[in-house]
Amino acid sequence: ADLPGAVTRGRSGPCRPAPSTLLLAILSGFERRGRWNVPRRLTTFALWGGGVVDLRYADFTSPEVEIRS
């Protein structure tokens, strides 16, 4: 937002709390991109697969977030 010409997207309202989440990929994959609510605790695990957690446009539901991978 402090870069010239940067576009800032504001929230339309308060962010809803998200429950602790497990993203699991076994012989497959998972993806979190775009606008989504980041929970206070996020655990990811991939076995013979892959996962993407993109936080660029995410809404944080807590001032502190714990991500375990």
Image (cartoon, helix red, strand yellow):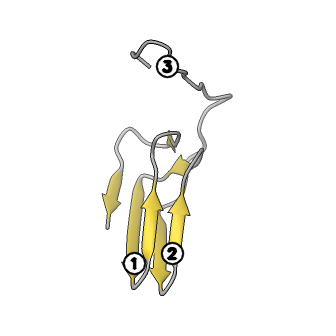
Q: Is residue 57 above or below residue 54?
A: above
| Location of mark 3 (residue) | 6
Kind of residue at disc 2: Gly
Q: Is residue 42 above or below residue 57?
A: below
Label 3: how many Cα within 10 Å (few below 14, some 14–19, many 20+): few
How far apart in space, not on screen, are marks 2 and 3 (Cα)? 31 Å
Q: Which badge, 3 or 1, is on the more N-terminal residue?
A: 3
| Closer to us: 55 or 62 | 55
Q: For residue 44, what is the image quadrant?
A: bottom left
| Closer to us: 1 or 66 | 1
Q: Residue at x 48, y 87 (%)?
A: 27
Q: Do the numbered discs 2 and 1 sit on residues whose CB atoms are within 8 Å? A: yes
Kind of residue at disc 3: Ala
Secondary structure under tag 2 reads strand
Q: Residue furthest top?
A: 4
Secondary structure under tag 1 reads strand
Q: Position of residue 16 (x, y in %)?
A: 60, 44
Q: Residue at x 47, y 79 (%)?
A: 25
Q: Which badge, 2 or 1, is on the more N-terminal residue?
A: 2
How far apart in space, not on screen, are marks 2 and 1 (Cα)? 7 Å
Q: Which badge, 2 or 3, is on the more N-terminal residue?
A: 3
Secondary structure under tag 3 reads loop
Quadrant of the image containing the N terminus: top left
| Location of mark 2 (residue) | 29
Q: Residue at x 38, y 75 (%)?
A: 45
Label 2: how many Cα within 10 Å (few below 14, some 14–19, many 20+): some
Label drawn at residue 46: 1
Q: Do the numbered discs 2 and 3 sit on residues whose CB atoms are within 8 Å? A: no
Kind of residue at disc 1: Ala
